[in-house]
Amino acid sequence: MRALDSFQGKRTTTALVRAAARTLRNVGLSVGLLAGVLTIVLVGAVSAQHRISLSGDIQAKISYCKDCHGVSAQGYNGYYPIPRLAGQQPVYLENQLRAFIEHRRTNNIMFNVAHSLSPAMVNALSAHFASLHPPPIGGAPRQLAATGRKIFEDGMPEVNIAACAACHGPEATGSGQIPRLAGQLYPYMIKTLSNWDKERGRNPTVPDAATIMSPVAHSLNRSQIEAVAAFVSTLR
């Protein structure tokens, strides 16, 4: 089917160019001007065909992502928690896909997914997921949220931990390479913060923005991690 679409696309492009050439000859344009106009027509036709092809490919990739990350990229809260991608910062998503390719993050499934994506596809997928805003899955212990909010907003000066809001924003929506935490799955947050050095910055030869989080993750104990995870998981 893809081969047929490609063949039909080429036939359409060729037909457009021929029709444009006939029209331009009829109005008496010079050879040089005719060539210039035909170049513009050809580039536009090829670009349009590329956009059609990318549109079809991205739908296939999105369907594949849904199998693990959920129909609206809300994440999957199972035995192995799979993160929410919905509403995530596009730059962060792009960086993390590169992190799997460069082995700054170790996940064989995501490496196989990421290394086959073109830069255009990475941009398209990141923009798509950033545009989604399903409600959080929830399920975190509500009694922990108040403690988590205090840590998130004020930090823990007594042990030199800055407020999470200082980087992730007052609504935990992130910015650029700093990820959105709002609505992230409670168990995924716990797993990630508890195993930071085992999951992030795994390739010392490649600089990784994730290193800024290492001292924070190390300084939080289990109960504090659970509290912060409970709070951010409720945010929309």
Image (spheres, rainbow, N blue to C red):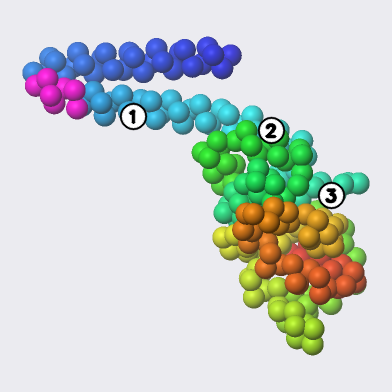
* Above or below: residue 1 compared with residue 146: above
Dot 1, how many residues are within 10 Å of its Cα: few (below 14), some (14-19), or many (20+)? Answer: few
Q: Which residue sits at x=78%, y=77%?
A: 151
Question: If you read the primary sequence from the N terminus, does the residue marked by circle 3 or circle 2 appear first?
Answer: 2
User: Magenta region: which residues?
Assistant: 29-36
Between the residue at mark 3 and the residue at mark 1, the CA separation in whole angstroms equals 44 Å
Q: Amino acid at mark 3?
A: Pro
Q: Amino acid at mark 2?
A: Ser
Q: Is residue 144 left or right of residue 24?
A: right
Residue 171 image position (x, y, % from top left): 66, 69
In this view, the residue in front, 173 or 135, is 173
Question: If you read the primary sequence from the N terminus, does the residue marked by circle 2 or circle 1 appear first?
Answer: 1
Tell me the element at label 1: helix
Q: Which residue is mark 1?
A: 44
Can the viewer see residue 74? no
Q: Is residue 122 left or right of residue 233?
A: left
Q: Main secondary structure of the magenta part?
A: helix
* Residue 31 within the magenta-colored segment of the rendering: yes
Residue 102 image position (x, y, % from top left): 65, 46
Residue 70 image position (x, y, % from top left): 76, 42
* Residue 216 within the magenta-colored segment of the rendering: no
Can the viewer see residue 61? yes
**Residue 63 disc label:** 2
Q: Which residue is mark 3?
A: 81
Tell me the element at label 2: helix
* Above or below: residue 123 compared with residue 189: above
